[in-house]
Image (tube, coloured by chain):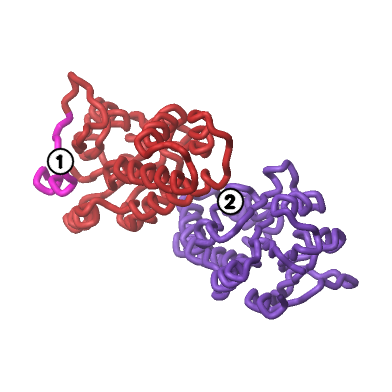
Chain colours: A red, B purple
Amino acid sequence: MIKSIIFNIDDTLYDSSFQLEMARMNAVKAMIESGLPVDVERAFRTINDIVEKYGRYYSKHFDRMLEQLGLRWDPRIIAAGVVAYRETSWAFLKPFPDTIPTLLNLRDRGYKLGVISNGDPVKQWQKLIKIGIHHLFHKVLLTREHGKDNIDEEVFQFILGELDLHPEEGALVSSTYSCGILEAKSLGMVTIFLRRKPSLDKIADFKPTYEIDRLSEILNIL
Amino acid sequence: MIKSIIFNIDDTLYDSSFQLEMARMNAVKAMIESGLPVDVERAFRTINDIVEKYGRYYSKHFDRMLEQLGLRWDPRIIAAGVVAYRETSWAFLKPFPDTIPTLLNLRDRGYKLGVISNGDPVKQWQKLIKIGIHHLFHKVLLTREHGKDNIDEEVFQFILGELDLHPEEGALVSSTYSCGILEAKSLGMVTIFLRRKPSLDKIADFKPTYEIDRLSEILNIL
C-alpha cells in the first residue's frame, strides 16, 4: 500500500520547460530591441544551441551567444537579455494549476509527501519557495547535500528510511527517465510517469507502474 | 557654459542605499521564517557585516552569514534569503521620483546626457534598463570596458571627446566623493554633489561647484 508520494521538481511540480522557453524568447526579443542585429528565429536558435552546449546553469549564455553570432561583446545587449530572462523566468515560476490542490488533497488523505532532486540545493529550494509549496512537504532530499550528483537507490532508501517506510510503500512521480525512475523501480517502489508533450526522454523497453498526463490523476490511482 | 551633464548611477539616478537596506531586511525576515534561529536585529547586523567584509557583489553572503552565526549550512534558509533579496531589490530598483522628468527636461533644453560608472558593465546596464532610462542618455561609459576599475581623468576626457566638448562644458553629478568627483574637478569640469542623508562619504577640505538635495535642482543651477 502506498503511504508516501515523492516528487521530482522540474517539469513535475511546475512547467520548467515552458518557463525556460518563454524566458529565452523574451530575452532574445529584448536583445534585438537593444541592438542585436539578427532576427528572432536565428537568435532563438542560437541561444538554444548555447544552452544545450553549456547547460542550463552556466552564467554566460548571452556572452557566448554574441560570440557564436560573430559579434563583439556588448554589455548593453547582454544586460537587456539578462533582465528580460530574469523577469520572465521569475514570472513563469508558477505551479501547474493542479499542483497545490493535489498536494493538499494527498496530505489530507494522510500521505507523506517528499521531494527528491539532484539540482543545486539552493536553487531547488528557491523554486519550492517561489512556487509557494515549500511548507507542503514532509521531507525534501537534495542529493548534492549527500555528496551525490545523481538520484540512486541509496538516496531513495535514505528518504524512505526517514519516513519509516519500505520501498513498496513509496511512489516516485517524475516526468523524465533520468531523474531516478529506473532506480526507484529496481528498488521496488511504485513509479508514476508524468507524460509531457513533447516527451522529455524515452526508454523503449521500460514500463513505469503508472502513466499520467497531469498530477491530479494521482488521486485516481491511489 | 555647461553643455553636458554626466551622472553616476548608484545613489544618483536611483536610491541604491535604500534598495539594498530593504532587500537585506526582507532577506533576513524570510530566513527567520524558514528557520534561522536568531532575532531580526542580530541577523540584520550580521548580514551588514558580511556585505561590508565581502563587498556588495559577492555571491555567497548568506552562506557566510550562517557561518558567522555558528550555524550549519542550510540550503532552505539560504534560498529563502536569496528569493526575498532578489524580489525586494528588483522591486526597489526604481528611479527617484524626479529622475525621469529631470532627464527629459535636460534633453529638451539641448543638454547632452551621459552616464559614467566603474561598476560591472552588465550589471550597470541592467539597472539602467530596469529603471527604464537606458534610452535617455547620449553616451554611457563603463570604465571596465576600458580596462579601468576607477573613474579617472582619462575616462572623463574620453567621454567629453566623444561628445566633442571641453572639460569646462561638462558637469558631473555624483553623491559620493569616490566616483570621480575629485578627478572631474581637477580636470576643470563643473561638479554637482547630490547630498544623501546620511551622507555617503565626506572630504573635509573639498568643495564641489554646487551641492543639491535632489536631482531636479540641477534645473535651477543651469
Q: Name the spot of residue B123 as percent of width and height, x first.
A: 58, 51
Q: Secondary structure at mark 2?
A: helix
In the rendered structure, which amino acid carries the disc numbered 1?
A: Asp
Along the line of sight, the residue nearer the viewer: A123 or B124: B124
Along the line of sight, the residue nearer the viewer: B57 or B25: B57
Let me know if residue A86 appears in the view: yes
Along the line of sight, the residue nearer the viewer: A19 or A42: A42
Circle 1 residues within 10 Å: few <14, some 14–19, many ≥20: few
Screen quadrant of the C terminus of chain B: bottom right
What residue does disc 2 label? B123
What residue does disc 1 label? A213
Foreground: disc 2 or disc 1? 2
In the rendered structure, which amino acid carries the disc numbered 2?
A: Lys
Q: Secondary structure at mark 1?
A: loop
Q: Quadrant of residue B18?
A: bottom right
Q: Chain of mark 2?
A: B
Q: Which residues are magenta?
A: A208-222
Q: Quadrant of residue B11?
A: bottom right
Q: Residue furthest top?
A: A205
| Cα gap from disc 2 to disc 1, whole angstroms | 41 Å
Q: Inspect the magenta stretch and tell me whether residue A120 lies in it.
A: no
Residue shown at the point (59%, 48%) measured from the top left: B59
Residue at mark 2 shares a chain with residue at mark 1: no
